[in-house]
Every structure is written in structure tokens, then in C-alpha cells.
Amino acid sequence: MTSFDQTSPVKSKDCMSDRIKKAIIQRIASGDYAPGQRLIELQLAKEFETSQAPVREAFCELEAMRIVETEPYKGTRVREITVTEWQECLVVRGALEQLAADSLSDRLQAQIPALRKIALETMQAAKDGDIDKYRQANLAFHKTIIDSCTNQTVISVWYSLAPEIRMTSSVYANAAHLEQSAQEHLEIVDALEEGDNRYAGRLLKKHTETLLIQTRSLNI
């Protein structure tokens, strides 16, 4: 199971609930928590050395994000993300990332070398058939772009999609086309390096559209 860093300071109940929520998302994305697995409120409270209140708040937020589901007398369980759902998220993500590219801050230019390195990592992982490594690098690539956006609403909505989980689903479904997707990452970096953010935005949207077409062709 993914470990929890007990050394980080906790300033409030709200901060703790956010940390619990993030930990649960990471555990679902990594496969530590499987679809249908029950999440025990008291167990998590003990692990995080807190009361059950912030755990309950984390569950409420995750339920609003459609990551978990709670049923009377059955408790809270990890919800299965359907194919239709993450395909719908691809459409939304593509639009958001195009908007993000249109409002990138100047600080992204300083991160271009790091972004290219991540893109190359996705290419190498694709060639090696290392889906888990690709998943991690792919998420880092898109997060780097989003985090450099000046539009806070775009950032907030993008993260509300729980990309750690829904991007993982699409990566595994699209395993046969990862090299093509990695090549598209490099093309996006080239456009950003040239300062053509608008074109980079179109490439980002096309990137998700291509992924959507590929997964739909699998009839899954």
C-alpha cells in the first residue's frame, strides 16, 4: 500500500481531509485500492492519526468527483470508472488543455527542457512497453503544462477530473498506440518552445481526440 508521509505538518482539519483525499486517489491510480474495495473510515482515521471527521469529508469530496460511492449499511467503496465516463473526460480534458495553452505563463519557457525530458521518458517507456512508467510520465507531462496556466478555473476543473485515475484508464486501454501518443508529446513541446502556444493548444486537443478515436475503435 502507498505509504503516507507522517512528517508533513497538519494545520487544520480541512488540510487533513485534502491529504486523505489525495492519498486515496493515488492508491486507486496505483492499483492499491481496487474497484469495489470498501474503504474503512475508522481504519483510515487511525492511519492518518486523526478523527473520523476529515475522513468523512474526504469521502464526501471523492463521492462528488464520482471516485467512490456510499450506500446505506454497506459503507463507502471505490467506484468503477466506466469506459464511457473516462472517454467523456477525454473530451473535457482536451478542451481544458487547449484553454490552458492559450493562457500559459512565461515561466513555462524555463521548464521546456524538463518538459522535453518528460516527453522523451514517455517515448522510452512506450518503446519498452512499460505502461506504468508511461502512465507516470504522461501525467507529469500534462500536469506541468496545466500548472503553468494562469487561468485558475481551468486548473481547478482539470484537477477535479482526478486525472491520476482517469488518465490511467485511458493509458492502459491505449497501450497499443503509446509510441504515437509519445511522439505527439514531442510535437507539443516543439510548439511551446517556439512560443506558439495557440498551436500547442490545438495539438493538445488533437492529442486527446486521437486517443478517443483509438479507444473507441477497440469497441471497449
Image: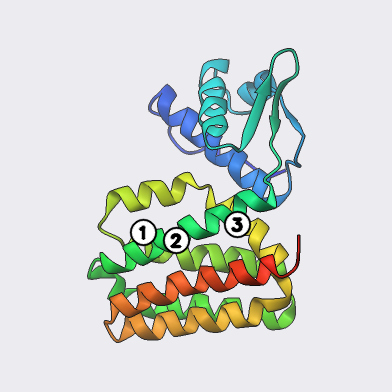
- The residue type indicated by label 2 comes to Lys
- The residue to which callout 3 is attached is 87
At x 52%, y 16%, the residue is 53
Q: Amino acid at mark 1?
A: Asp
Q: Residue furthest top?
A: 73
Residues under labels 2 and 3: Cα distance? 19 Å
Confirm whether residue 144 shows in the render. yes
90 vs 182: above or below: above
Q: How many marks?
A: 3
Q: Which residue is mark 1?
A: 147
- Image coords of residue 24 (percent x, y): 61, 38
Identify whether 194 is placed above or below 75.
below
In the image, what residue occupies the spot 24% across and 66% down? 105
| Disc on res. 143 | 2
**Front position among marks 1 and 3:** 3
Proximity of marks 1 and 2: CB atoms separated by less than 8 Å:
yes
| Chain-order first, disc 2 or disc 3 | 3
Q: From the viewer's perspective, is 204 left or right of 34?
A: left
Q: Are marks 1 and 3 in contact (CB under 8 Å)?
A: no
Between 119 and 197, the one nearer to me in the picture: 197
